[in-house]
Amino acid sequence: MSIKRPGLLLLALLTGACSGLSALNPLNWWGNPVGAQPTPLADIKPTLTIAPLWRASVGAAPAHRFAPAIAGGTVFAAGQDGSLAAFDAADGKQKWRVQANRDGLSAGVGADRDTVVVATIKGEVLAFDAAGREKWKTRVTSEVLAVPLVSQDLVIVRSNDNRLFALDAIDGRRRWVYQRAAPALVLRNFAGMTAADTSIFAGFPGGRLVALNRSNGSVRWDAAVAQPRGATELERIADLSSAPAMGERAVCAVAFQGRVACFDPGNGQPLWAREMSSHAGIAVDTRYAFVSDDRSAVVGLAAGSGSSLWRQDRLLHRGVSAPLSLGRAVIVGDYQGVVHALAREDGTLIGRAQTDGGWIGSGPLAMNLPGRDAFIVQTRSGGLFAFSL
């Protein structure tokens, strides 16, 4: 079944017999956007240079959404063909490359200085050390599409049957599992998790944001980002399909066909909420919250109140990624592999750079390089591109 919305293809993947669940994919991977036509790129007057630092390549990902990870001055990246590689963050020099899984990968990469984690459509979770040697492998209950989260001594993995698994980072032993019931119709979910202090934050179908105790998986609080509404199951989809974002004193999330909302990370008390729909994601800094909505408009909000500050509509229907707040700019990528810089203060388009033409499905990732603002993107074609501002 396919359902058209402006700039959005919803593919209902009906499952069988026992579960009776359906999964919706809110994208068609942006290889051929449907609905409204992507806005052609008009000339801009750049006032910010997006300078290439280096480029590298990993396997392409035509059917999955991959993102790199950075830890200890190293960029780790994986491809759908099963390749996993490490590159020096400063100059892109390859440190090592391994074949993580011959059958291919469906998610990755989560990493810290000691552990690099990828996963497969069969629910296999594979961990390597910082030199590319296998540490352990285990299996969860279904396919893994979301990037694993490596947080201190835990690896948190989301399986596509709505479970979170906490695995020991040393040996892969299962420490705890969190599960919740899903609505009848849900998005095929690539949503990652976020860690802060002693909590793990994760969004779920039905518009729920949950804070879990990282030591035992117990629920600290459970809050509504959005309330499902409408006469049909399609209209009632209100899933959190992107990772929560941490601000100075708030954790924020956005739902598809729902709202964007921020909460006190300690007790889950709502700070503010407003109507908005996004499957791409949200970024929060000290003053602002930025959202790429489901029409690829990029919206700037006041982090403390949620009030509207600006809206950039010149990238409509271009499959814009989650935003990154970096220096004086907000960085997004699009379905043609173009990187855009927007002015943080007013949303004006101030810079642009090309990659290899592959869709940038995951948000740009900041790199901590001395003396400069830098970031990296990974394209669906398998390209890694590092830039500085």
Image (tube, helix red, strand yellow):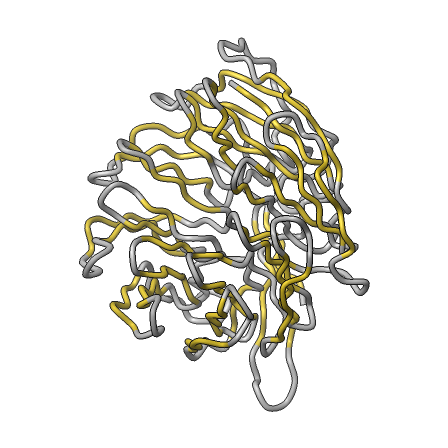
Measuring 53% from the left and 11% from the top, which residue is drawn there? 46
Viewer-proximal residue among 208 and 165: 165
388 lies above or below 59: above
Where residue 348 appears, as percent x and y from the top left, is 44, 19
Measuring 68% from the left and 39% from the top, which residue is drawn there? 379
341 lies above or below 384: above
Measuring 33% from the left and 53% from the top, which residue is drawn there? 196
**Residue 287 in the figure: left or right of residue 388:** left
List the single residue furthest toward the bottom: 18
Where residue 54 appears, as percent x and y from the top left, is 68, 24
Task: Give the image quarter of residue 303.
Answer: top left
How many marks the image carries: the answer is 0
Task: Give the image quarter of residue 101.
Answer: bottom right
76 lies above or below 287: below
Measuring 52% from the left and 69% from the top, which residue is drawn there? 186
Quadrant for the N terminus in the image: bottom right
**Residue 294 in the figure: left or right of residue 379:** left
List the single residue furthest toward the right: 102
253 lies above or below 186: above
Where residue 56 appears, as percent x and y from the top left, is 73, 33
Viewer-proximal residue among 320 and 314: 320
Where residue 295 appears, as percent x and y from the top left, is 51, 42
